[in-house]
Image: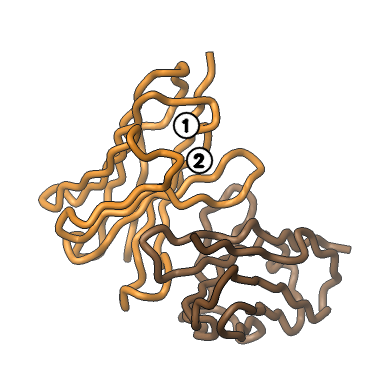
Chain colours: A brown, B orange
């Protein structure tokens, strides 16, 4: 089974900062990667699909890149609403695994 | 507008059973694969099960295989998860989720979740 590993587990940053979260797959997954944002007490929200395709309504400060085994989610200028937990997911499997999550905290 | 509303969660003793439901609206339910995803308190997301648009194929995570059964009723726009032989480690918020409209881009819509607590 393919495993997804995110880093870091926790990231402290300030409003206006540029931040990058990494997701690594245990074997090549082409660009079959999704990124989700989850705020406390809420359901996850799909931000990016197919590694770099921004979902409708998602602010352009979010971007995704990568292929194969290494992927990144970048937020170009953090806004207060962005402090949340982010998950990656390999999505071309009958058992689509998630990464363990990256909690983005206010510094 | 797409809506997914889960129900059926609650407190159950170890070894007990529970049936979760997910009521869907705002889209043609019978056209989409549906999934259950869970999240233990303070933990990450774990995919649990999926069911194809017409009722097959069906897949389960190894952690629930043989204990949980996913089903759907397209006439009632409803998704179900029958959970038997429940264990403490099944304690989680259970979300139903619909795949993306393009079928290959992740889980586009999620319900608000229903909490299942397995404890004596």
User: Residue at 40% across / 66% down in the picture?
Assistant: A93
Q: Are marks 2 and 1 in contact (CB under 8 Å)?
A: yes
* Left or right of residue B91, residue B51 in this image: left
User: Residue at 36% across / 40% down in the picture?
Assistant: B65
Using the image as rendered, state which of residue B18 and residue A69 is in the foreground.
Answer: A69
The residues bearing labels 2 and 1 have C-alpha atoms spaced at a distance of 6 Å
Q: Which residue is mark 2?
A: B93
Choose the circle earlier in sequence order: 2 or 1.
2
Q: Element at badge 1?
A: strand
Q: Position of residue B82 (x, y in %)?
A: 30, 34
Q: Element at badge 2?
A: strand
Q: Quadrant of residue A15?
A: bottom right
User: Residue at 60% across / 78% down in the picture?
Assistant: A69
* Left or right of residue B59, residue A97 in this image: right
- Density class for disc 1 (Cα within 10 Å; few <14, some 14-19, many ≥20) is many
Q: Which residue is mark 1?
A: B116
Q: Position of residue A61 (x, y in %)?
A: 66, 84
User: Residue at 51% across / 75% down in the picture?
Assistant: A33
Q: Position of residue A106 (x, y in %)?
A: 83, 62
Subunit under mark 1: B
Q: Position of residue B22 (x, y in %)?
A: 31, 45
């Amino acid at each position: 089974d393919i495993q997804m590993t995110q880093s870091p587990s926790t990231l402290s940053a300030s409003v206006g900062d540029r931040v990058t979260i990494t997701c690594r797959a245990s074997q090549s997954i082409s660009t079959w990667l999704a990124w989700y944002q989850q705020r406390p007490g809420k359901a996850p929200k799909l931000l990016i699909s197919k590694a770099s395709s921004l979902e409708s309504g998602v602010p352009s400060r979010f971007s995704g890149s990568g292929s194969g085994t290494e992927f990144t989610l970048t937020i170009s200028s953090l806004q207060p609403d962005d402090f949340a937990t982010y998950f990656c997911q390999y999505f071309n499997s009958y058992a689509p695994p998630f990464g363990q999550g990256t909690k983005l905290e206010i510094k | 507008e797409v809506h997914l509303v889960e129900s059926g969660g609650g407190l159950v003793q170890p070894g007990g059973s529970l049936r979760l439901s997910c009521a869907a609206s705002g889209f043609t339910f019978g056209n989409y694969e549906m999934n259950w995803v869970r999240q233990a308190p303070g933990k990450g997301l774990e995919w649990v099960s999926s069911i194809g648009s017409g009722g097959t194929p069906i897949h389960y995570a190894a952690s629930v295989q043989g204990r949980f059964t996913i089903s759907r009723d397209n006439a009632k726009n409803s998704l179900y998860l029958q959970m038997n032989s429940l264990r403490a480690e099944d304690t989680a918020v259970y979300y139903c989720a619909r795949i993306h409209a393009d079928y290959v881009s992740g889980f586009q819509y999620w319900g608000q979740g229903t909490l299942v607590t397995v404890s004596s």
